[in-house]
Image: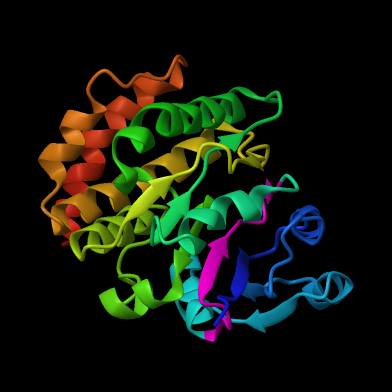
Amino acid sequence: MDKKVTVLITSFNDTRIRNTLESIRGQTMTPDEILVADGGTKWDISKVCSEFDARLEIIPGNVVETRSKAINMANGDIVAFIDTDEVAPAEWLQKLTEPVFSGVADFTGGPTRHKPPKSGPEDYMNKLEDMIYENLVPENIAYLPMGNSAWRKSIFQAIGGFDLNIYGGSEDYDINIRALKSGFRGKYVPEAYLYHDHSDISSYRALIKKRYSYLRATAKTYIKNRQLANRVTSSKGRRVDHPFYIIEALMKPVALIDAFLRN
């Protein structure tokens, strides 16, 4: 029996979803289902979803809670993830899912590209993401962000899904680590790239809030999975050429202590 593909978009108050949906409708490989899992958008998102023949499910909660429930609702055997701040080139879905269809991998992921930044905080997020995909992910698929990935749906059922106590961006790493420990195979697909828009991070206050939440969640993830030493080792020599990198380096030990206290 042919495997079906669901493209899953988790949304919340982001009008950029129109661009995302338009790019999915322009794929060379047509998905069997486009599922929008919305956490409680204040404007009428149903009109946009109807325009692009996307199925809408209203699932209140943070992104991890919404995504977890949405995966169980997906009709596809393979679930491909894209976020509302991302746009897919025409061959994205075909390239991303091919290793899963061929049996080479159980989950895959691709990198992101960016437009010229309009602010210092946006520039930092772009450079940080470039470093992750150029250095960390090719060496260890556990560092793969979920926003551009495709998974056999059965993986989530086999490992118990997301840990709802971990959110803020690091739930990706936790699910990756557990999937790999369970024997599932991941593959990095450099040609399956997306365009990622970080223009919403336009102030350093917003950047600090976002990065601290992420660092705390990451520390919690690696404490839980006993991977903290590996994380420290992997970060050595991985610098981002931006002044904010110093601020982030100072936030890391504070976030680590915070994570220990919250465990």
Determine if the magenta segment contains residue 84. yes
Magenta stretch: includes residue 16: no
Judging depth in this view, the residue of 98 and 112 nearest the camera is 98
Q: Horizontal and vertical percent for residue 224?
A: 15, 59
Using the image, determine if residue 207 lies above or below residue 67: above
Q: Which residues are magenta?
A: 73-88
Residue at 17% in and 33% down? 232
Image-quadrant location for residue 51:
bottom right
Give the left or right position of residue 89, taking residue 129 as reference: right
**Rendered residue at 80%/53% (across/down):** 19
Q: Residue at x 80, y 61 (%)?
A: 25
Residue 88 left/right relative to 249? right
Q: Residue at x 51, y 63 (%)?
A: 101
Snapshot quadrant of residue 13: bottom right
Q: Depth check: 252 or 92 in front?
A: 92
User: Residue 27 in the image: x percent, y percent?
Assistant: 76, 56
Residue 259 in percent (x, y) is at 21, 52
Quadrant position of the N terminus in the picture: bottom right
Q: Is residue 147 above or below residue 204?
A: below
Asked if residue 18 is positioned above or below residue 115 in the image, the reply reads below
